[in-house]
Image (cartoon, rainbow, N blue to C red):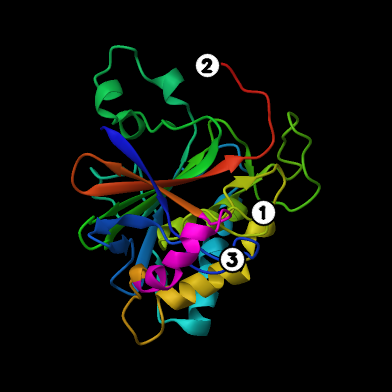
Amino acid sequence: MRVTVLGLLVLLGLPARAQGYVRTVAGTQGDTVICVVWNKRELTYRVDAAGSRRTPGDTEFTALDAAFSTWQSLSDSCSDFKIIRGTRISNPVVGAQSTDANVLTFRETSCRAAVPQDDPCLADGSCGNKYACWDHSDGTIGLTTLTFSTRTGVILDADIEFNAAGYLFTTITTPPCDPGAEATTCAAYDVQNTATHEIGHVFGFDHVDVPSSTMAPTAPIGETTKRVIDVGTAEGFCSTYPAGQPPIPCDELARLQRHIDAENAGSFGCACSEAAVAPWLAGGGLLALALRRRRRH
């Protein structure tokens, strides 16, 4: 699968010094900016029944449900979007070739370790699903893949992968682990923290370069602050999915902000990726903030 990265500068929300929000762009038609969006108000998610082998007990499942509950509580305050927990799934497939809708899975092994060098999946990008392995950047903690129409921006599917091959996922809040000494007795890379951020991508929001934002692109070891949806991201959700009204096209806001974008050097950048196959994909990932030792595979 060939991936093309598009850098589109779009300011949708508050000035760069505030938290604000950025919607993920699907493409443009003439002067019209098209953002990804759900055209229905119901999302059913399904979690990989295997969970995470290194996270104690079933706490990862509880943490994932808590992350979705946080977004549901926000929706209850301003929208009519309903989030439904579906049955757990075994051996889920993510991405454009998937018929498994809206799945979350922990990838426990790096594809570098799992995939033979002569496997054709290395050429077509299917190794992650074939071997249930992590096939993305080592520095990415979690990654969301959206399948959507580039003509309308309508989201068809959203899948979340957690890089359990490179990071230890925990669910306790304190004490934070020391970098390089991650353990289940301290807070390493928090499941709920990561999931709350990635669910923001599921709803069509991109990274915001403000450390206090739920959608900030990085997370230090032990961070749990993204469990709480910040004011800017909440405003983005409520503005995009208003109760009793259709989703708001992002170009309505873009027109109002376009002259500001051209002048504001601190504008938020929206980087989207599209695959050269239909349906189309956009990826958003949460990056590790601190340098850490890498296991060699």
Q: Can residue 200 be seen from the camera position used here?
A: no
User: For residue 261: magenta?
Assistant: yes
Q: Earlier in the sequence, mark 1 or mark 3?
A: 3
- What's the mark number on residue 246? none
Label 2 crowd bin: few (<14), some (14–19), many (20+), radius 10 Å: few
The picture quadrant where one finds residue 233 is bottom right
Q: Residue at position x 31%, y 80% from top?
A: 246
Q: Nearer the viewer, mark 3 or mark 2?
A: 3
Callouts 2 and 1 close, C-beta under 8 Å: no
Residue 98: percent from left, percent from top: 25, 46
Give residue 15's mark: 3
> Is 259 within the magenta?
yes
Against 200, is 52 above or below?
Answer: above
Q: Residue at x 22, y 56 (%)?
A: 149
Q: Amino acid at mark 3?
A: Pro
Please state which amino acid type lies under the numbered disc 1. Answer: Pro
Taking 18 as reference, is 235 left or right?
Answer: left
Q: Which mark is residue 297?
A: 2
Please report the residue visible at 58 percent of the width from the left and 69 percent of the height from the top: 232
For numbered disc 1, what is the local secondary structure? loop
For disc 1, the neighbor class at 10 Å (few under 14, some 14 to 19, many from 20) is some
Residue nearest the observer in this picture, 21 or 202: 21
Q: Amino acid at mark 2?
A: His
Q: CA distance from mark 2 to mark 1?
A: 32 Å
In the rendered structure, which segment of residues is drawn in magenta?
Answer: 252-268
Residue at the spot of label 1: 211
| Nearer-the-camera pick, 223 or 242 | 242
Query: Would you say residue 178 is visible in this rendering?
Result: yes
Secondary structure of the residue carrying numbered label 2: loop
First in residue order: circle 2 vs circle 1: 1
Task: Determine whether 62 is above or below 288 in the image.
Answer: below
